[in-house]
Amino acid sequence: MKIKRFFAKDISGAIRKVREELGADAVILSNTEVSGGIEIVAAIDYDEALFDGLGMQGSQGHSSRSSHPEPEPVLAKATASQSTRQPDGKPTLEVVASPAAESAQRPAVKIEWSQEPTLVEMRREMQSLRGMMENRLTGLAWGEQARSRPQHTRLLRELLNIGLDPALCHELAAEQDEGDDYDYMWRESLGRLAQRLPISDSDILDEGGVIALLGPTGVGKTTSIAKLAARYALRHGSHNVALVTTDSYRIGAHEQLRIYGRILNVPVRIANDGHELHETLASLQDKRLVLIDTAGMSQRDIRLSEQIAVIHEGSPMVRSFLVLSATTQFTALDEAVKVFAAAEPEGCIITKTDEASSLGPVLSVIYKHNLPVAYVADGQRVPEDLRLARAHNLVKQAMELKQDEERMLEQDLLAMAAEGQGTHVHG
């Protein structure tokens, strides 16, 4: 085992010296603030058994097996760490050695990362270095792939530009033959994307029933309910439709639904809990379609489970649909689908496609979770801006949005070039 002491003005410089001289496998044994900077003791080619011995000896740590001239290390290769201070008040780092065979009966050590400023800065520096290495490796991988499989790489980039999740892009691109014409590969990939999108085979406006729309706040649940109610009233008569709201959290939520009810000439009821919802639905048994507007909440809101429980307690006949906004990012959409899965939605409604800059995120999420799309809403007009979902229409719209973005980018670049040329001429 080789132990060496390093000194630098700051923690970044000290870590850099350790990395340059001992390599990436070096183990930091201790760090100490000294006059003029930071002192780090690091080791390479450590002896596992020796460190187990040191770990079992506790704070005294004087092992007769160590023959190194350096002071005995405060740290060993370990699975947990905590921050302490030496008798002179200087911070140091103690690490409990990983359990050896003879110490298997010792209780498991709880991992607690130290918040000592020097160690926090050390971890931040290491994370930054890791990110730089990953980015460089990714760039090298792209370069190598572009040389070996240019068609495949181009296809992958175009799919990513639609906004699709990288995993789905790789899956679609991997199915294409590198030797094919690129235009054929592109059309084939879009066709396979359309085939993968789950589309609901049920039409609420034909089947009726008790339908609850769920989803995060601001996704357009109330407007979607108004569109469905208006379409159904036009087709089957307003006397066959009723609206119910369980939203007792938002100020004015009831009034918004009441306005739609007066316009459509359909009754509006309020249910604050599962018992009231059960009684309300019982009183509306003569209606062919009952639409339930639920409270819009963040997927992280602790009251979300209460809203889902209200629907479950109201009636086992309630069919749930999740409302997803096309303007939401993939991560938030993915989280929402996972959280609202407790309500067992049988499909979803995609809203605000007219406001979205890309449909890639929402298409990726419905594919990932196999959540069938029932309707697509592309505007605020009631009831016009609502249509049955069609896979090829969704892919076509995703492509149109991508082309619009490319045209806008091209126009911006031309404008910048023209502005720069004008400045040069006048100069």
Image (cartoon, rainbow, N blue to C red):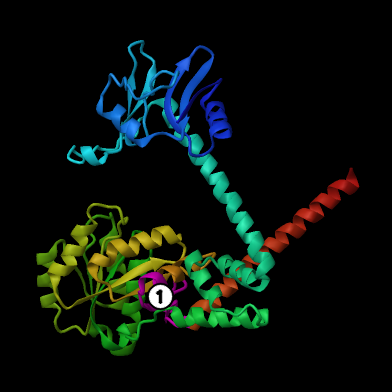
Q: Is residue 376 magenta?
A: yes
- At label 1, the amino acid type is Val
Q: Is residue 298 above or below residue 169?
A: above
Q: Is residue 150 left or right of residue 352?
A: right
Q: Quadrant of the N terminus?
A: top left
Which of the 4 image quarters holds residue 7? top right
Q: Is residue 329 above or below residue 11?
A: below
Residue 186 on image: x %, y %: 61, 78
Secondary structure state at the residue bearing disc 1: loop
Is 230 covered by the magenta stretch? no
Q: Nearer the viewer, residue 146 or 232?
A: 146
Quadrant location of the C terminus in the rendered image? top right
Indicate the position of residue 382 as horizontal and vertical percent values: 40, 75
Is 392 left, or right, of 102 in this rendering?
Answer: right
Quarter holding residue 155? bottom right
* Closest to the observer, 85 or 388: 85
Please state the total of marks drawn on the protein image.
Answer: 1
Residue 107, image x, y percentages: 18, 38
Q: Nearer the viewer, residue 37 or 372?
A: 37
Quick check: 179 above or below 47? below
Disc 1 designates what residue? 382
Tell me if I can see residue 47 in this picture: yes
Q: Which contiguous range is marked in magenta? A: 366-391
Crowd class of label 1 (few under 14; some 14 to 19; many from 20; radius 10 Å):
some
